[in-house]
Amino acid sequence: MQRKKIVLSSLLVIGMLIMNSTNSIPSSQYNSFDEFLDAVNQALLVDKDQLIQEYLDEQRLVDNIPVVEENNCIFLYYGNITTAEVAGDFTGWSPESMTRITNTNLWYLQKQFPADSRLDYKLVVDGNWILDPENDALILGGFGHNSEISMPEYKPDPSIQFYDYIPHGTLVTIPNFYSATFANYRTMKVYLPPNYDPNGTTLYPTLYVTDGLEYIEIAKFDNVLDYLLVNGLISEVVVVFIPPIDRGSEYFDEKLKFREFITTEVIPYIETNYKVSQNRTDRGLMGASLGGYISFFTGFNEENTFGLIASQSGYFPMDLIAAYSSRTPNIKYYVDIGTFETSVSGTNLFLFNEEMNNTLTSKGYTFTYQKINEGHSWGNWRAHLDDILTYFFPGSGESQNTTIFTTTEPITTTETQIENTSSQSSQSSQSSDSTTSTSEGKTTPIETSTTSSQATTTSFFTFTSITFLGVIRRILKRKR
């Protein structure tokens, strides 16, 4: 009987949502969070918690915690605790205190972000770093999941998702690749496009990717390649994913060895075993954070080897910037940086990237530069792989599959994943490498040709299904 009541209540709520012709969100008795805050502060002590619970239920119903009101973002935590803080891209991952509403268990922190921002964060409750229990949106990083907030004008990148109905390239594993330079072994992976023919005459361009396995596992690089290729947005390319063994040492302390490792070991192996071009203008090298540094360092000193260099949230110390101001290599460059990357392990990466941009501009380099309202995170970097690939390897613009239907809904994470990662501290993870997303629009993908009525029907049933599942999930969560 109780289950029937839950289902009937849920269906009633769905009907109310569908009938609302403006934005499918039930109207609130408050025009803003500040108005709600005033009401709670002025209410009698016995009424405060009821007002809070009603407000939280309203926001839960429409998945609006943290509460987003235009450029305002209000982080909330309800509980009888001693301290509550928020740490994220916007705080440099240094915890910022939340305020407790007097004589209640509701804590809050109000921030303002650009309308197209996407940011990682965690709550710090009584000293414990946790995922936001009120927010199902998660983003995977190098040290597990973080909670994620997207502002109203942020557009998720559809290319990172896996579509089972499109052609897929092949990921070839090269196990135990031995480096005489470093005297160690590592497992590399190579992406071959769907039409790759080992016996053909086509010679493919190559892109070498530092932190390669994370670019596959976290950034979904192979998904991006499949999507862009099938939509005709890039030409066919072979991509080599190279993991570090000792990241800080290889990319910085022993950068001369890494340069030798790439040019004398990795490239000769790839060009011996795969049908790839040996023209320098067809070779690229890229990476994020320190991976961006080693790419720029190697590119500057290997002009005869590489014609394409990309950095995402790269570390650009003044000596590297000075080198780039001394001469102009004949290389095509891509650079992006997050506007929230002003304190990454105590370093203002945003300022360094601005300085590099000024240098490249003044010296007449061929390059593109993007500033993105995000932080130092994989969520940022993966959303702009398409920008790098379409810049370096532009396609014909003709889709290879006219039956594609794409979606821009963000990737979801299961509750099991939430439970497995909720205890992980993000404090150390934010000192590693990550990046942010751009405000520039994406190329519209090829979609299935449908009639207006078909599209409307699909939209209606999609909305109804999503709303129904969301309401059921919220009700069951509260009952538990």
Image (cartoon, grey):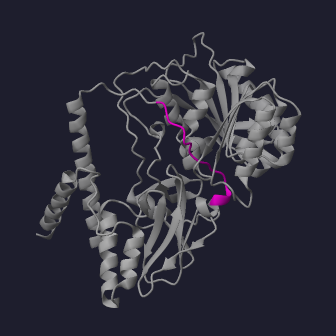
Looking at the rendering, which quadrant does residue 428 occupy? bottom right
Q: Residue at x 44, y 38 (%)?
A: 158
Q: Position of residue 192 (x, y in %)?
A: 56, 26
Which one is nearer the viewer's eye here, 201 or 182?
201
Residue 440 drawn in magenta? yes
Q: Residue at x 39, y 55 (%)?
A: 414
Which one is nearer the viewer's eye here, 3 or 244?
3
Q: Position of residue 270 (x, y in %)?
A: 68, 25
Quadrant of the snapshot with the C terminus: bottom left
State whether residue 300 is above or below residue 147.
Answer: above
Quadrant of the snapshot with the N terminus: bottom left
State whether residue 9 is above or below residue 225.
Answer: below
State whether residue 103 is above or below residue 77.
Answer: below
Residue farthest to the bottom? Answer: 45
Q: Position of residue 212 (x, y in %)?
A: 63, 40
Residue 189 lies left or right of residue 109; in this view the side is: right
Residue 265 lies left or right of residue 55; in this view the side is: right
Looking at the rendering, which quadrant does residue 262 occupy? top right
Residue 350 visible in the shown view? yes
State whether residue 285 is above or below residue 43.
Answer: above
Which one is nearer the viewer's eye here, 238 or 34?
34
Residue farthest to the right? Answer: 326
Residue farthest to the left? Answer: 1
Which one is nearer the viewer's eye here, 435 or 176?
435
**Magenta-drawn segment:** 430-443
Residue farthest to the top? Answer: 201
Residue 314 lies left or right of residue 298; in this view the side is: left
